């Protein structure tokens, strides 16, 4: 028996959208519906294909299937998506494809016992509801509201660029986000969608030294001390020291003492302070006494020259246990060049025909 509905089923589609994002491993923007279609082995055809197959014009395909943009056929348990490749806006095509994926994933064709969703097979009310559900699905998978709010991407031009939506869809999304902000809708940091996008949301990069890492709290680059921005950094500074769970070096950075001979965080062999943390900020009062104006934020990673929270220099950097970033970069780049040349030689040898 086909299902009967009389309103948009938010309680049904919301968890389905979260499930889809998790199952399809959608964890960054923009999202490519073509990749999802290929991965799920659904067939995809252009309107042009149908026009040629039936020896008709493109407008006849649009008329016959009742959509200018796209439609889905469900036959013998298999799905086939068709889209109008003559539409000029790639953003609009992207949205149409995700809308059709929505019909598939929300089981509209199966549950309503249709081979194709058209006004004829359903009541007008049902048809409009299913269309709205597929639109919400497309909007929330191509541009998840929680992710956009977490990143502060609420301006339509940012949404258009980052999610690759059409200007019209981006403007609609921006107005939806404005409503959410206006109504104090709160983004739950434990939401499964946020969890999926965690690395994307909290990726930080430094345009000065090129370092990139994931952190929800860091404001300053731990390598060069500059302000961080959102994005993917390419440089890895793996010249730091391994630390234990208390932030104490596992091996003494100065004398290499591996038998954990420390007393109160100092190496008992050479006296080196074993914790990397930002230095207290101090000032001197009128009597010449030094006093602390800001205490340390606590332990930082073993490669940090600067505190990612406050930007102050770290103990390891002050003690010259870590080289200035320019020098470290030079060394790391020479190392990787040497490694790359070695690899080339090895491959060349394998390629020799004798
Ligand atoms: Zn539709
Ligand atoms: Zn930096
Ligand atoms: Zn030591
Ligand atoms: Zn600090």
Image: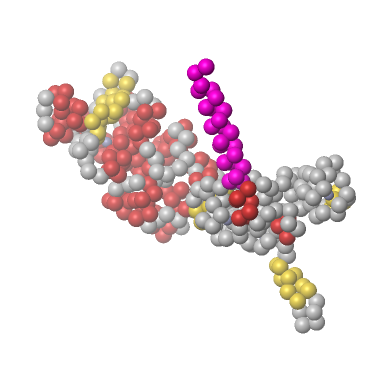
Vertical comparison of 171 with 334: above or below: below
- Residue 244 figure quarter: top right
Examine the structure image and report whether residue 339 is included in the region drawn in magenta: yes
Question: Percent from the top left, x then y, of residue 203?
Answer: 53, 49
Part of the protein shown in magenta:
332-354
- Depth check: give the residue in front, 193 or 329: 329
Question: Percent from the top left, x then y, of residue 348?
Answer: 52, 27
Question: Percent from the top left, x then y, of residue 319?
Answer: 75, 58
Vertical comparison of 263 with 115: above or below: below
- Depth check: give the residue in front, 91 or 305: 305
- Residue 135 figure quarter: top left
Residue at horizontal 53 percent and vertical 27 percent from the top:
347
Q: Does the rendering let one see residue 5?
A: no
Question: Percent from the top left, x then y, of residue 86?
Answer: 20, 38
Residue at horizontal 39 percent and vertical 40 percent from the top:
31
Q: Does the rendering let one see residue 90?
A: yes
Q: Is residue 186 left or right of residue 284?
A: left
- Residue 57 figure quarter: top left
- The quadrant of the image that shows the N terminus is top left
- Depth check: give the residue in front, 77 or 151: 151
């Amino acid at each position: 028996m086909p299902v009967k509905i009389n309103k948009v089923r938010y309680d049904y589609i919301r968890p389905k959208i979260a499930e889809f994002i998790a199952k399809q491993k959608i964890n960054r923007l923009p999202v490519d519906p073509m990749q999802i279609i290929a991965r799920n082995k659904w067939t995809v055809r252009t309107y042009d294909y149908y026009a040629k197959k039936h020896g008709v014009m493109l407008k006849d395909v649009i008329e016959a299937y009742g959509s200018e943009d796209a439609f889905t056929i469900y036959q013998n348990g298999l799905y086939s998506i068709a889209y109008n490749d003559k539409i000029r806006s790639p953003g609009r095509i992207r949205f149409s494809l995700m809308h059709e994926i929505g019909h598939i994933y929300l089981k509209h064709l199966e549950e309503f016992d249709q081979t194709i969703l058209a006004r004829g097979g359903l009541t007008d009310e049902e048809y409009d509801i299913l269309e709205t559900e597929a639109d919400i699905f497309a909007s929330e998978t191509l541009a998840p509201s929680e992710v956009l709010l977490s990143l502060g991407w609420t301006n339509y031009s940012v949404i258009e660029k980052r999610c690759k939506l059409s200007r019209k869809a981006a403007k609609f999304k921006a107005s939806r986000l404005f409503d959410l902000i206006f109504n104090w809708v709160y983004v739950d940091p434990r939401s499964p969608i946020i969890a999926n996008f965690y690395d994307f949301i909290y990726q930080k990069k430094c345009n000065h030294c090129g370092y990139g890492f994931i952190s929800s709290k860091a404001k300053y680059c731990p390598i060069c001390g500059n302000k961080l921005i959102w994005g993917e950094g390419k440089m890895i500074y793996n010249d730091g020291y391994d630390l234990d769970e208390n932030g104490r070096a596992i091996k003494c950075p100065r004398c290499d003492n591996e038998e954990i001979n420390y007393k109160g965080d100092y190496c008992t062999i050479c006296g080196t302070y074993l914790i990397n943390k930002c230095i207290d900020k101090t000032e001197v009062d009128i009597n010449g006494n030094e006093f602390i104006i800001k205490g340390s934020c606590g332990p930082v990673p073993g490669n940090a020259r600067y505190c990612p929270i406050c930007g102050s220099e770290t103990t390891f950097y002050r003690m010259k246990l870590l080289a200035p970033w320019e020098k470290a970069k030079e060394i790391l780049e020479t190392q990787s060049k040497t490694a790359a040349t070695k690899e080339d030689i090895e491959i060349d040898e394998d390629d020799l025909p004798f």
